[in-house]
Amino acid sequence: MQTASERLPAARYAAAWRLWSKLERVVVPALILAGWEAFSRSGALPQSLLPPPSAVLHALGDWVLGLDGSTQDYSGTWFRHALSSSWRVFAGFVIAGLSGILIGTAIGWSRSAEKTLEPTLQMLRPVPPVSWIPLAIIWFGIADKPAIFLVFLGAFFPTLMNTIHGVKTIDRNLIRAGAMMGASGRQLLVHIVVPAALPSIFAGLRIAIGSAWMLTVTAEMVAVKSGVGYVLWDSYYFLRYDMVIAAMVSIGLLGYLSDLAIKRLMGVVLRWQRTTTVQGREG
Amino acid sequence: MAEIAIRSIVKTFTDRTRGREITALDTVSLNIGDHDFVCLLGPSGCGKSTLLNMIAGFEAPSSGRIEVGGTLVEKPGADRGVVFQQPTLMPWLTVADNVAFHLKLKGVGRTERRARAQHFIDLVGLTGFEGHYPSELSGGMNQRVGIARALLMNPRVILMDEPFAALDAQTKLEMQEELVAIWQRIRCTIVFVTHSVDEALVLGNRIAVMTRRPGRIRDYFDFDMPRPRDITSPAFNDAKRRVLALIREEAGSSRKAA
Ligand SMILES: Nc1ncnc2c1ncn2[C@@H]1O[C@H](COP(=O)(O)OP(=O)(O)OP(=O)(O)O)[C@@H](O)[C@H]1O
Ligand SMILES: [Mg+2]
C-alpha cells in the first residue's frame, strides 16, 4: 500500500511538470524582456537610444489606441498603416503565388517550358529584389504599385523553385497509375501532379510570405508614404527610437499572423498528411 | 484468338553510368487466351515486371509487338487494370476516392461514384474504411484498395505484379482465395507475376516459367487442378516437383555457362 508521504513527491512533480508545459513557450521571451528592461534602466546607455520595453509598449499603446497622444501625429493610426502594409503584402503575394505555381508547374512538367523559360528566370533570380527599387519608382511612381511589384519579386522565386521541385520529384508510379486509369495529359496535371506537389508548394509559400513582409517594409522605407515601414523610417528621422522598435514589433507580429494563416490553410488542404509526421503526432 | 498476344519481344536497357546495354528480355513470345489466369513465374531480375509494364503500355519493347484484344499496345489505358508491386495510391485521396478515381476522370457524379466504389470496397473486405487515407491503413489494406481500384474499371485484362509479396501468410491465403473467386465471377483475363512456386500453382490455370536474365520463356503449360486447391495434396506436390525440377535444371545450366 502507498503511504501519503510516498505519493506526495510524485504529485508535486506532476504539478510542476504541468506548470512548466504551460510556461515553456514564454520563458525565453520573458527573460529577454526582463534583461532588456533592466539594462536599459541601468543607465549604461542613454534611455533615448535604447528605450526599455515598457517605453516601447507605451508608444505602441498610443499608436494603436490613441491613449495620450505621446506619439504625436501617429497617435491612433496603427490600423491604417498596418492595413496599407497588409494590403501590399496580400496583393503581391497572391500575384506571385498564382504565377509561381503556374509557371513552376509548367517548367517542372514540360521539357520545352523548361528549356524556354528556366534560363531567363534563373538569371533574374540572383538579382536582389531591392535593386529593382529605382526602376520600380520610375515605372510605378510613389504609391502602392512599386511596393506590390517588389513583394511580387520577393515572393515569386521561392514559390517557383519549390513548385518546380515538387513537380519534378513526383513518384513516377503515381503518373503511371493515373494513365492506367485513363487520365489525359491535362487530367494527370490537375488530378495528380499538382496535388502531389502541394506539400512542396506550401513550403515555398511559407518562405514567400516572409520575403513579402521584408520587401513591403523595405519599399515603404524608400518609395511609399504610408505603412508600418514608412512609420519606422519616419520615426528614425525624428529620433523616436521607441516608435522604431514599436514598428519592428508590429512587423514581427503581422508576419507571424500571416504565416499562421498559411499554416492553417495548409493544415486543411494537406490534412491527409497529418498522420504521416515522424512520431505520428499531429503537428 | 488470343486475348493477349506477345510476339518476339526483346527489351534492352541502356545503362548510361556504366555505358553498356542490358538485355532484360530476349525474344519472349506468349499467347494468353480469354479468361486465362496466367502466372508468370521467375527469379528476381528476370524481367517479369518489365514484361508486365510493356503489356500495360508503360514501356515500349525494343523490338516485337504486343496486342491486347487484337489492337497494338501503344500507351496505357483503362482496358488494362494494373495492380502495382507497391500499392501506389494517391495519398491525398480517401479509400473511396482512390477506388473511384477512374470514374472521377470520366466525369461521373459524386453519388454514383460513391455507390459503385462501395461495391468494390465491400468486395475486398474494407467496409468501414471508406473515409480513411492510405497513410492510415496497413500495407495489406492498401494493396486491397489497389485491387478494388483495378476491378472497378471492369477491365478486360488485369495485370498484377507480386501484389501479395508483402503480406503475411494468413492474409495472403485469404486474398488468394478471394482473387480466384473474383476471377471466376467476373471472367476477366489475369496476368499475375510471382516468384513463389506455391502461389503460381494455387492461382493459375496456366503457368509460364521464365529463365534468369536475359528472361526467356522456359516452359508454358496448363495446370487444370480443380479448385479449391489443396496445397498439401499429392497432385499439388507432383506439379510443384515438376516446376522445381525445371527451375533447378535452369539454375544448373546457367551455372555451367558462367
Ligand atoms: N529502367 C531500367 N533501366 C535499366 N535497367 C533496368 C530498368 N528496369 C529494369 N532493368 C533491368 O532489367 C532487369 C529486369 O528487371 P525487372 O524489374 O523486370 O525484374 P523482375 O523480374 O520484376 O524482378 P523482381 O522479381 O525482383 O521484381 C533487371 O535485371 C534490371 O537490371
Ligand atoms: Mg518486379
Image (cartoon, rainbow, N blue to C red):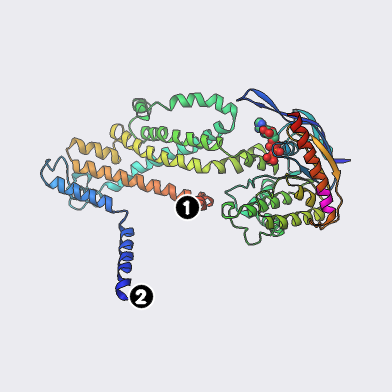
Asked if labels 2 and 1 touch by Cβ distance under 8 angstroms, the answer is no
* Residue named by callout 2: A2
Q: Where in the figure is residue A104, as x and y percent of width and height?
A: 52, 34
Report the residue at 81% width, 47% height from top. B241
What numbered label is drawn on residue A279?
1
Hey, which quadrant is residue B16 in on the image?
top right
| Residue A252 % position (x, y) | 31, 44
Q: Amino acid at mark 2?
A: Gln
Q: Is residue A236 visible?
A: yes
Label 1 SS: loop
Q: Is residue B233 left or right of residue A144?
A: right
Q: Residue at x 30, y 62 (%)?
A: A19
Q: Which residues are magenta?
A: B235-240
Is B238 in the magenta? Answer: yes
Q: Is residue B193 magenta?
A: no
Label 1 or label 2, whichever comes before in sequence order: 2
Q: Are marks 1 and 2 on the same chain?
A: yes
**Which residue occupies 70% across, 39% down?**
B44
Viewer-proximal residue, A274 or B249?
B249
